[in-house]
Amino acid sequence: MARERRAFVFEPLGAPGEPTAVVVSDQALLAEAIAAGLRSCGLVTLPLGWPPTRAEIDAAPGGRPVVGVALFESDRSDVLGQVHELVAAVAEIRWIVLTAVPSGPLWGAYLEAGAAAVLARSSSLDEVAEVVRAVAAGGEPPGTDAETWRSAWSRVRQEQRVVHVTLASLTPSEREVLDLLFLGRSVPEVAEARGVTLSTVRHQVRSVLLKFGVTSQLAAVARYAELREIAESDAGSPE
C-alpha cells in the first residue's frame, strides 16, 4: 500500500529578518525535528512532506523561501536521484543536503546534481544554521571543500565510463566464463557446465586477460568483481 503523504500547515516561526528555510525529508518526523531545531537557532522554518510541491512553497507565509534543507534516509543511489528530483521540482531554492554518506565523491555528485551545499548528518544545529544563513545570503558555506568533492566525483564518473567500455568489450561467452569463475568454478567445471572443450575455455580466459590488462586468471576474476561492483553502484545514479 502506498505511504500516505503527510502535509504540514502552520505559520512559520522564527526571528524576524531571518531567512525562511524549507525543511524536507523522506521521513516526516525528521523534517519536523530538524525544523524545530533550526527554529531554536533563530531561523524561520517551514517543514514540508516529500516530495515538496511548488504550490506549497509558493504559498509559504512571508514569501517564497530561498533556501531549503533536505535529509534522506534512503540508500546512496536513491539519495542522488532524490537530489535531482528536488532541484528539478523547485530550482529556485538553494538546497542544502544533509547526508550520512562520508565526505567524498558522492558529495561532489550531490553538488553536480544542483545542491548548493552538502553537510554531514552529524553536524550540529548551529553548524547547519550557519550554512543556511550563508547559502541564503548567496555566499559559499564556511569550511567546505566543494572543488575537491567535485573533482573526486569527476574521477569516479570517468572510471565508471571505463568500466562500461571494458565490460561491453566482453563477448557473451567471455561474460559467462567469468561469471562461473567468479562463483568459484574451476576451468574444467566451466567447460563441463558450458558443454565446450577445455581449450575453448582457456582461449576465452586468455582473451579476457588481454582485455583486462592482467596476467593471471585470479587477477582477472578480481578485476571482474571490481568492475561489477562499480557498474552496479552506477546503475542507480542519474547522469
Image: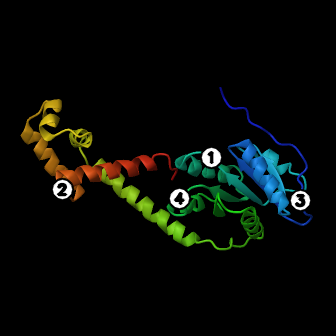
Amino acid type of the residue tagged 4 in the rendering: Leu
The residue at the point 56 percent across, 61 percent down is: 107
Disc assigned to residue 13: none
Instruction: List x then y, in percent, for residue 72.
Output: 64, 49
Residue 198 point in image, percent of width and height: 8, 39
Element under disc 1: loop
Please state which of residues 43 and 154 is positioned toward the viewer in this rendering.
43
Determine whether, in the image, residue 222 is placed left or right of residue 123: left
Label 2 or label 1, whichever comes before in sequence order: 1
What is the CA distance from the residue labelled 2 to the residue labelled 4? 32 Å
Mark drawn on residue 14: 3
Q: Which residue is mark 1?
A: 73
**Disc 3 marks which amino acid?**
Gly
* Gap between marks 1 and 4 measured at Cα: 15 Å
Name the residue at 21% across, 59% down: 213
Spot occupied by residue 29 in the image (x, y as percentages of width and height): 75, 44
Could you tell me which secondary element the residue under label 4 belongs to?
helix
Please name the residue that numbered disc 2 is placed on.
210
Tell which circle, 2 or 4, labels the residue nearer the N-terminal end.
Answer: 4
Q: Secondary structure at mark 2?
A: helix
